[in-house]
Image (cartoon, rainbow, N blue to C red):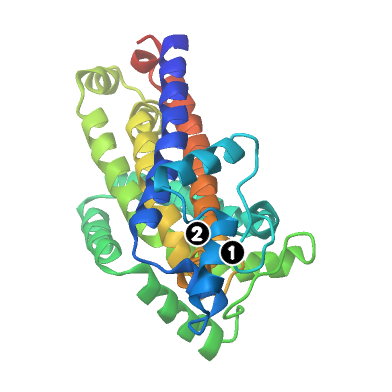
């Protein structure tokens, strides 16, 4: 188990370097005139040259990257081209918003997906067919379209929840919950169907295994067979799928935050991209990578606890 954890940590550290590096060089080779984007299209060549020299944009891309990496390793992600404010100051208030949305979606599709998967396994063919239909719908319906429908029905027509915006947990817990309700549902819907199908498939395999057949022959109750043995044996692969889905959830949060006008990392990412504010985009890539690494490490540990084969590898 220790060897596996060390390998996972090494992989995570590599990911923390590779993703920001790729982001930096992709931005660097993109034909964007940062100086004119900040100074305006009427800026003189002398002003553009002075701007590029001040920020080091006239240096080779590799030199720019090494300078950024050196500062980043000391906790300095640079300053915004647009406001000169430090990237950490811009992003820090937005992290809580994004985490509330992302973790909320993760919990919803983990809990609801597992429950639906168990019900479709134990409830007969009809429930299984319903799950298949819902799963197809979940994979086919884009989350931005679902978000629009949810707002039209529950905010515009029924006036039950806010259509946009975000209220922090410290200011008003009830409004915090209501402001997250529709965004979390829209973001989690596709994940619910994926987790439900994985849970059902794994439980069907577990229920047909020689081990559970022996337990059934020995007269064990249906409840114990399903929830104590089959569900537990199915948990490892389901948890692994959660890690795979989470990456898509993180990217989907960018769209959802902009639809619901939530002041998170996703909405800031779009604003910064439109303004060619490269240091802020780079900082968001770093934060997103850190979130992915932490969640995947947690999932790896949970998988090791649930699966003895992985634990002893």
Residue extending farthest right: 171
Q: Is the residue 224 above or below the residue 175 in the image?
A: above
Q: Secondary structure at mark 1?
A: loop
In the image, 240 versus 252, the foreground residue is: 252
Find the distance from the CA under tag 2 to the CA under tag 1: 7 Å
Q: Earlier in the sequence, mark 2 or mark 1?
A: 1
Can see residue 258? no
> What residue did someone put label 1 on?
81
| Image quadrant containing the N terminus | top left
C-beta proximity under 8 Å, tags 2 and 1 = yes
13 relative to 55, above or below? above
Query: Could you tell me which residue is drawn at 46 percent across and 63 percent down?
Result: 254
Q: Is residue 256 left or right of residue 178?
A: left
Number of numbered discs present?
2
Residue 278 - label: 2
> In the rendered view, does 64 fall on the left or right side of 308?
right
Q: Residue visible at 26% across and 66% down?
A: 137
Badge 1: residue crowd in 10 Å (few <14, some 14–19, many ≥20): many
Q: Is residue 33 left or right of residue 73?
A: left
Whole-percent x, y for residue 91 in the image: 64, 56
State left or right for residue 43 relative to residue 149. Answer: right
In this orientation, which residue lies closer to the viewer: 24 or 49?
Answer: 49
Whole-percent x, y for residue 275 in the image: 50, 72
Please provide percent x and percent y for residue 192: 38, 54
């Amino acid at each position: 188990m220790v060897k596996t954890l060390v390998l996972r940590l090494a992989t995570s550290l590599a990911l923390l370097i590779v993703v920001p590096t790729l982001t930096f060089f992709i931005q660097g080779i993109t034909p964007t005139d940062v100086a004119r984007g900040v100074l305006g299209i009427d800026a003189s060549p002398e002003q553009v040259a002075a701007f590029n020299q001040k920020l080091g944009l006239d240096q080779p891309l590799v030199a720019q990257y090494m300078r950024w990496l050196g500062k980043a390793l000391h906790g300095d992600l640079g300053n915004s081209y647009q406001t000169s404010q430090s990237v950490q100051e811009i992003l820090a208030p937005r992290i809580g918003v994004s985490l509330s949305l992302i973790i909320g979606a993760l919990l919803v599709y983990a809990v609801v997906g597992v429950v639906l998967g168990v019900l479709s396994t134990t409830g007969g063919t009809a429930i299984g067919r319903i799950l298949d239909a819902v799963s197809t719908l979940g994979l086919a319906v884009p989350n931005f379209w679902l978000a629009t429908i949810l707002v039209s029905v529950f905010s515009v027509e029924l006036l039950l929840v806010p259509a946009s915006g975000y209220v922090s947990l410290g200011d008003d817990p009830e409004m915090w919950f209501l402001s997250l309700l529709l965004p979390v549902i829209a973001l989690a819907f596709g994940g619910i169907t994926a987790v439900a199908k994985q849970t059902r498939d794994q439980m069907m395999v577990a229920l047909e295994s020689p081990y559970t057949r022996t337990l059934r022959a020995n007269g064990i109750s249906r409840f114990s067979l399903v929830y104590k043995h089959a569900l537990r044996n199915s948990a490892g692969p389901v948890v692994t799928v959660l890690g795979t889905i989470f990456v898509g959830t993180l990217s989907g949060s960018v769209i959802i935050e902009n639809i619901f006008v939530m002041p998170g990392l996703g909405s800031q990412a779009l604003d910064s991209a439109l303004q060619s504010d490269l240091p802020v985009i780079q900082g968001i890539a770093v934060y997103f990578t850190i979130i992915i690494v932490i969640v995947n490490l947690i999932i790896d540990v949970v998988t090791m606890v649930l699966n003895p084969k992985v634990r002893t590898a």
